[in-house]
Amino acid sequence: MYGSPLVTPSSPPYIGRFAPSPTGPLHAGSLLAALGSWLHARRHGGRWLLRVEDLDPPREPPGSAEDQLATLARLGLHADGPVLWQSRRHAAYAEALARLQADGLAFRCGCSRADLAASAGIHRGCITAPPADPRAGSVRLRVDDRSIAFDDAVHGRIVQHLASTVGDVVLRRADGLWAYQLACVVDDAFQGITHIVRGADLLDSTPRQIALQQALGLPTPHYLHLPLRRDAQGRKLSKSEGAAAITGQNPLDLLRSAWAALGQDPADWPGGATPEAALAAAVPAFDPVRIPPDPIGGASDTVRHCDAGHSSGLLDRG
Ligand SMILES: [Zn+2]
């Protein structure tokens, strides 16, 4: 079965991506998402793009983005086109926001967290009397009273009722920074992304992003959320932990380890003289069906989210 074509002449084009935030060096968890999205794209005869999500300067140490891109290149993970930098995309986000506001789908909000807690999340004043200064406050997407559902290639059917769980989605923060959800949706459409393969820590962002795609009249890509990597104690790898380990390690060892974390048989890892050679040989052996929902050797937070309804009933499995 390995080597069987997953793409036929009539299949729509596949465009995938990896979109790291440059908040530190690439770590083993982000490598898993990079490799998983690369293999999935290549296995389907698709293209793979890179996007730097550099929209939060206070959290981005200088040089982190360049360092991450250099690490990806050292691992043989080369993009099929120019890197998209979100810090150069402000005009596109402003245009999307203006369209939502003109369509009555987004509103300016002056509520604090305490205000929203006191009103059970209802924006009593904001819609009828928004903040007087147009630059003040945040801008939010008005969510409908309906559930958003999608089929994740690993986690199955996911259903979320946004109004009762997360409320109206922030699009531009009160400090003026663009919210991740808006920038991600605008740029996935701009780059023509058809398949989003990323870590399961973003599983509960997906219904918000689908609601936003619908409000903007944009297509919804296919989704596959990868297991999160754990350290030896079973804790989620943060950007600081594990970062030192990846910079000092042999690229071929890192790739083989990420291959196993993707649920692939270590015996199928072909190896090679260079990362590029190993990756090219790995593509026909990669089987997306083997990707586990939980990290190898431990239960994931994601599954606990779903079973326990997350912290506030965020996600349900249909
Ligand atoms: Zn409000």
Image (tube, helix red, strand yellow):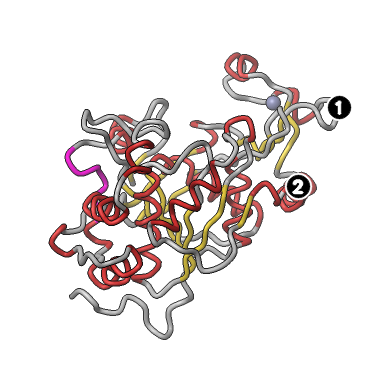
Q: Secondary structure at mark 1?
A: loop
Q: Is residue 129 left or right of residue 144?
A: right
Is residue 184 depicted above or below 273 in this figure? above
Place of residue 138 in the rendered image (x, y in percent of width and height, measured from the top left): 71, 30
Q: Is mark 1 within 8 Å of ligand 1?
A: no
Residue type indicated by callout 1: Asp
Q: CA distance from mark 1 to mark 2?
A: 17 Å
In this view, the residue in front, 227 or 158, is 227
Q: Picture quarter containing residue 289?
A: bottom left
User: Residue beneath label 2, please?
Assistant: 94
Q: Which residues are magenta?
A: 291-297
Residue pictured at 58% horizontal, 49% vertical: 184
Q: Is mark 2 within 8 Å of ligand 1?
A: no
Place of residue 44 in the rendered image (x, y in percent of width and height, measured from the top left): 37, 72
Q: Picture quarter containing residue 137?
A: top right
Residue pictured at 21% horizontal, 32% vertical: 232
Is residue 290 depicted above or below 12 in this figure? above
Place of residue 309 in the rendered image (x, y in percent of width and height, measured from the top left): 35, 31
User: Residue beneath label 1, please?
Assistant: 133
In this view, the residue in front, 170 or 115, is 170
Type of secondary structure dominating the magenta stretch: loop
Place of residue 119 in the rendered image (x, y in percent of width and height, measured from the top left): 62, 17
**267 falls in the magenta region:** no
Q: Secondary structure at mark 2?
A: helix
Residue type indicated by callout 2: Ala
Q: Earlier in the sequence, mark 1 or mark 2?
A: 2
Q: Where ligand 1 lies, by image quadrant?
A: top right
